Image (cartoon, rainbow, N blue to C red):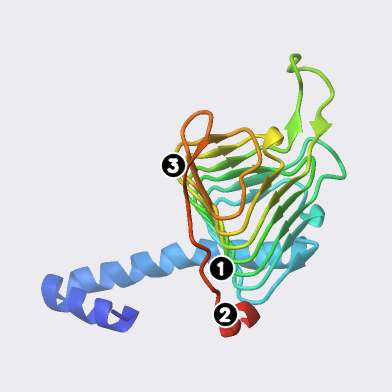
Amino acid sequence: MHTGDKVRGFFQRGGFFYGIVYLVWRSWEALPRLLFTLLYRHALKACGTGSVFAQGVYIANPRNVEIGKNCYVGADVQIGSETPDGALRCGDQVQISEGCRIDHSGGVMIGDRTLLSANARIYSHDHGYDPRSKPTPVKITIAEDVWIGAGAMILPSTGSIGKQAIVGAGAVVTKPVPEGAIVAGNPARIVKMRTPTHIPASQEAS
């Protein structure tokens, strides 16, 4: 249903007064998104067309972050690094849902069309057994078409997650995930292998 149809339906069900309240609320909700999107399109090292940033997004080192085209960064996402050179690069059509935390101290790459569900965590540095020690950066690469479930945690020892892999909700990933694997649990283990699906050329080029 299109936005116009929703508005008309709301007027019909709730009356004129409630329709006006709904329109004001929707406009007020859209304003912060517009402001955050304008801010980060200028602040980031690179930001592709069509990408949107929701209210409350915090990026500590914006000049070390590249976002591709048609990406979505949800409300209250936090992106930062404990090292000055750590970088984050997202491909096109990446979705980082609300409440996610991404530490790119060691360098994090996220491939096209990958989805991070709400409150997922990525850590790319390690302190060993001393939480006050100097962070050791570790690179993490997440390939294309990966789905990381809600509340999942990707630890530095993960290293890489292969194409079209799925990380179950709440999983704690401690080692590399092969292409097409479905992992779940703490620590995460392979529970199933997917048959790779073909991505249409039109979608790859979009």
Going 51% across and 69% down the picture, which residue do you hit? 197
Residue 4 position by quadrant? bottom left
Question: Measured along the vertical axis of the image, is residue 154 above or below residue 134?
Answer: below
Label 3 and label 2: CA atoms lie apart by: 27 Å
The disc labelled 1 sits on which kind of residue? Leu
Q: Secondary structure at mark 2?
A: helix
The disc labelled 2 sits on which kind of residue? Gln
Image marks 3 and 2: residues in contact by CB distance under 8 Å: no
Q: Which mark is residue 203?
A: 2
The disc labelled 3 sits on which kind of residue? Ala
Label 2 and label 1: CA atoms lie apart by: 26 Å
In the displayed orientation, state which residue is furthest to the right. Answer: 85
Q: Secondary structure at mark 3?
A: loop
Percent of width and height locating residue 60: 73, 46
Going 50% across and 66% down the picture, which residue do you hit? 31
Q: Earlier in the sequence, mark 2 or mark 1?
A: 1
Percent of width and height locating residue 40: 69, 62
- Between residues 176 and 171, which one lies in front from this camera angle? 176
Q: Which residue is mark 1?
A: 34
Q: Which residue is mark 3?
A: 169
Q: Secondary structure at mark 1?
A: helix
